[in-house]
Image (cartoon, rainbow, N blue to C red):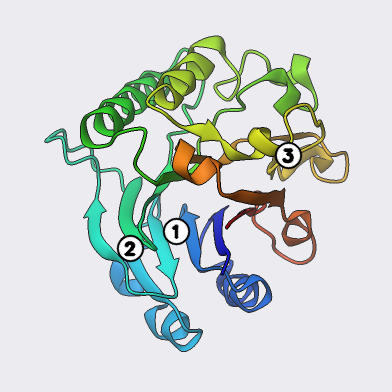
Amino acid sequence: MPIKIITWNVNSIRARHDRLLALLARHEPDVLCLQELKLEEAKFPWDEVRAAGYHAAVLGQKSYNGVAILSRTAPEDVRRGMGDGEEDGHARLISARLHGIRVYSAYFPNGGTPDSDKYAFKLAWMARLEKKLRTEHTPDEALALCGDFNVAPTDLDVKNVEKWADTVLCRPDARAALERIRGVGLIDSLRRLRPEEGNLYSYWDYQMLGFPKNDGLRIDHVDVTAPLAERLLEVRIDREERKGKQPSDHAPVIATFA
């Protein structure tokens, strides 16, 4: 049976509570990685998620950040945070073993503005993640790094290149940091199957009619090691989830594997 993995920045699970349950019913993923929960673990909708047929591993934080992995089978070997002894108070990374795959749900720092401390934190956080992946995993291990990376890898992933070029989502040093992370043996699943296709975006700002104008960027990703890349059947972005009443500003990315 195929395995379906979805990643989605919900931008507040409280605001997207009904949408979350509807998405589970509509897509029936085997694994759903969530980012930007914006609540503590105690306030996570455990009962509703369980009633929908899913287990959940959660790393929460009041009002900010927060990541989770929902799965039909019970997650094994759940790991929360970087585990490198550098506590930063940010709930941005969780992983678990599911279906023989090490699955990460990651919420990369946005970075604010290029001249801010937040941007320095973003680059440092990405360097820590690279080190973690390089230290704890090998390229021949089945691994999926899923989440909101807050980086558009190339200009092909940006509708309005001039507008976004010098922002924290597109700057060369942020892109280079992502390439170093991918250098541990990760492959951009969407580009594996659709290497030259444009107009594939996962994020549109709420302001200035971003979605109606399709002023988007592809900053949500499912990166996989070679053993999973070889099993890829389909990768798509669910633009429909960005429509309607009170959507997240991100759309889910759906990857299906043999």
Q: What amino acid is labelled 3 in the image?
A: Tyr
Q: What amino acid is labelled 2 in the image?
A: Val
Residue most extreme to the bottom: 51
Q: Secondary structure at mark 1?
A: loop
Q: Quadrant of the C terminus?
A: bottom right
Looking at the image, residue 129 lies above or below residue 166: below
| Side (left or right) of 148 relative to 200 | left
Q: Are marks 1 and 2 in contact (CB under 8 Å)?
A: yes
Q: How far from the left and from the top, in percent, is residue 55?
A: 38, 75
User: How far apart are the alpha carbons under marks 1 and 3?
Assistant: 21 Å
Give the residue number, with chain letter if any, for mark 3.
201
Residue name at image x 22 percent, y 36 percent: 136
Looking at the image, residue 21 lies above or below residue 58: below
* Residue in front for this viewpoint, 125 or 136: 136
Q: Secondary structure at mark 3?
A: loop
Residue name at image x 67 percent, y 15 percent: 165
Q: Earlier in the sequence, mark 1 or mark 3?
A: 1
Q: Is any atom of residue 75 visible in this view? A: yes
Q: Earlier in the sequence, mark 3 or mark 2?
A: 2
Q: Secondary structure at mark 2?
A: strand
Q: Earlier in the sequence, mark 1 or mark 2?
A: 1
Q: Quadrant of the N terminus?
A: bottom right
Give the residue number, with chain letter if any, for mark 2.
58
Q: Quadrant of residue 163?
A: top right
Residue most extreme to the left: 85
Q: How far from the left and from the top, in percent, is residue 53?
A: 47, 84
| Side (left or right) of 194 relative to 3 | right
Residue name at image x 70 percent, y 38 percent: 193
Q: How many other residues sit within 10 Å of disc 2, few (<14), some (14-19) or many (≥20)?
A: many
Q: How far from the left and from the top, in percent, is residue 103?
A: 39, 52
* Residue in front for this viewpoint, 140 or 28: 140
Q: How many marks?
A: 3
